[in-house]
Image (tube, grey):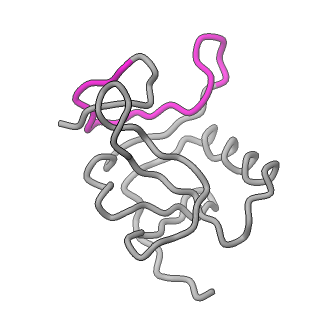
Amino acid sequence: MEKESIQDIPITFTSGAIDKLNEVKDTENVKEDMFLRVGVKGGGCAGLTYLLAFDTKTDRDDIYLIGGLEVIMDRAHAMYVIGMEIDYQKGLNSRGFVFNNPNADKTCGCGTSFDAK
């Protein structure tokens, strides 16, 4: 498979998120032709929900390289997540991926649903 040019990433991942994503990739035996998909979809209590999963690339996706992971994002989703930081927390009160999105106008208690400005 020929690699396409890799773009500057519009989002960032903390080292904790990169470590956890690499762990998931290894333990779940993610196939070589899969990429980490970041994006949004309609739904959730605030209107939009974040996507973070291993997936195959489509013609609408741009590809980025973050911490050794090849990340794909639908071009139409960038406006909702540009400048976002994805973290992974292991604390007692908060466990899992955390999305710190400067474009979120409001969020809900679950932390994965938001409404854009």
Q: Residue at x 47, y 52 (%)?
A: 38
Above or below 62: residue 43 = above
Instruction: Answer with left or right where residue 71 lies relative to residue 32.
Output: left
Q: Residue furthest left?
A: 117
Q: Quadrant of residue 56?
A: bottom right
Which quadrant does the C terminus fall into? top left
Q: Residue at coordinates 43% horizontally, 41% vertically from top-left?
A: 50
Q: Nearer the viewer, residue 49 or 105?
A: 49
- Region rendered in magenta: 90-108
Look at 38% across and 62% down and name the residue there. 74
Q: Quadrant of the N terminus?
A: bottom right
Q: Nearer the viewer, residue 3 or 9?
A: 3
* Picture residue at 80% right of the left edge, 57% below the top: 29
Please tell me which residue lies in front, 111 or 42.
Answer: 42
Q: Left of 54 or right of it: where is 10? A: left
Q: Residue furthest front?
A: 43
Determine which quarter of the picture holds residue 2. bottom right
Q: Does the stretch in magenta take in 105?
A: yes
Image position, residue 53 (x, y; %) = 58, 50
Measured along the vertical axis of the image, is residue 68 above or below residue 116? below
Location of residue 55 in the rendering, given as x and y in whole percent from the top left corner: 58, 60
Indicate whether residue 99 is drawn in magenta: yes
Q: Is residue 11 left or right of residue 70?
A: left
- Residue sitting at the far top: 93
33 versus 23 height, above or below: below
Q: Quadrant of residue 14?
A: top right
Q: Nearer the viewer, residue 30 or 20?
A: 30
Say left or right for 106 vs 28: left
Residue 23's x, y, as percent? 76, 46
